[in-house]
Amino acid sequence: MKLKKIMKSIGILLLLLILFIFLNNSNWFQKNDQAKPKLLAHVGMAQTYPMDGITGETCTAKRIFEPEHSYIGNTIPSVEAAFEHEADIVELDVHPTTDGEFAVFHDWTLECRTDGAGVTREHTMEELKNLDIGYGYTADGGETYPFRGKGVGLMPTLKEVLTHFPNKPFLINIKSNDPEEGKKLADYLSNIPGINMEQLSAYGGNKPIQVLQEELPNLRVMSMETLKSCLKSYMGVGWTGYVPSSCEDTQIHIPENVAPWLWGFPNKFQDRMEAVNTRVVLVAGEGKWSEGFDDKEDVKRIPEGYDGYVWTNRVDVLAPLIKE
């Protein structure tokens, strides 16, 4: 009889615990039908391409879709167009140069997109400025090159972008895992007059991001290491409503297939992260190759009421679907 009472008490406690977890992480009382996601434009406005079969060695410029606009990503015109299409933040890729600059350009090497050759960071900025960054783009297997001759001088420095858009938010992608690059970028940003550091964030390799965080503690940063630390800790204790310190003052890019497993996603999770000054970015699929929410069908997969950021390669398509 005594054992039955003990088991009954345990059963009641378990039911109460389950009820607490459910109610504490339910979005029933937080649903906001007016909430709209914010848009993170990957490299501004850019030419897009099919994601199937992509590897780290794929030259994506050689497989673009038939162009629907004239912009080349990671350029000042492409950033301007993204903000005109209501992007809330623009992501850029950077490489240090041999003369102390940071070039805004995606690829580790130059052969894919440009008429140059070699490793991007092994050149001076003057050399990079002389390249045609539209040289390699083709939508028909090399029969035509619609941007050839139109990209000469369009590779900007990071300073040029930030001073051209002094009050706009940017996410800077460090393309290496070199800790020295973190120090160089911290010094570089600190010496650009008039920029609003609170509008900037950065992500990339663990080592440079760690150094960047130490040098600029008020800069929101993310690496794979910081992301995993946050998400693993949160999955362990987030059911209580507690947000681990590893999730504070940072940025987290959440793959679409991981998001449903996070306690309180989307609304309560988003509110918890906002309360600790952390930006949430939802990326499509597994988030491995810059997959974005890029068309009308993709929008249907964005959770109702989610008001964090979504990663897109087609801000011109997404903005009318989401913002109006």
Image: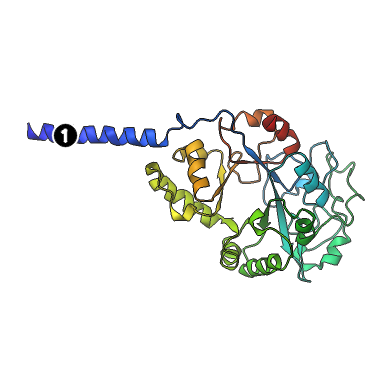
Q: Residue at x 12, y 31 (%)?
A: 4
Say if residue 297 shows up in the picture: yes
Q: Residue at x 64, y 40 (%)?
A: 38
Q: Residue at x 38, y 33 (%)?
A: 23
Q: Is residue 226 above or below residue 315?
A: below
Q: Is residue 191 above or below residue 304?
A: below
Horizontal relation, residue 30 to residue 149: left or right: left
Residue 264 image point, x, y percent: 45, 38
Q: Is residue 127 above or below residue 280?
A: below
Looking at the image, which is closer to me, 240 or 253? 240
Q: Residue extending furthest front?
A: 194
Horizontal relation, residue 138 to residue 30: left or right: right
Looking at the image, which is closer to me, 76 or 300? 76
Neighbourhood count class around disc 1 (C-alpha, 10 Å): few under 14, some 14–19, many 20 upward: few
Horizontal relation, residue 149 to residue 138: left or right: right
The mark total stands at: 1
Report which residue position mark 1 lands on.
7
Residue 57 image point, x, y percent: 70, 52
Report helix, strand or loop for mark 1. helix
Say if residue 47 shows up in the picture: no
Residue 285 image point, x, y percent: 59, 39
Quadrant of the rendering where the C terminus is positioned: top right
Q: Residue extending furthest left?
A: 1
The three-letter code of the residue at mark 1 reads Met
Residue 130 image point, x, y percent: 89, 61
Looking at the image, which is closer to me, 259 or 138? 259
For residue 25, which quarter of the picture? top left
The image's colouring method is rainbow
Quadrant of the rendering where the N terminus is positioned: top left
Q: Residue at x 55, y 44 (%)?
A: 254
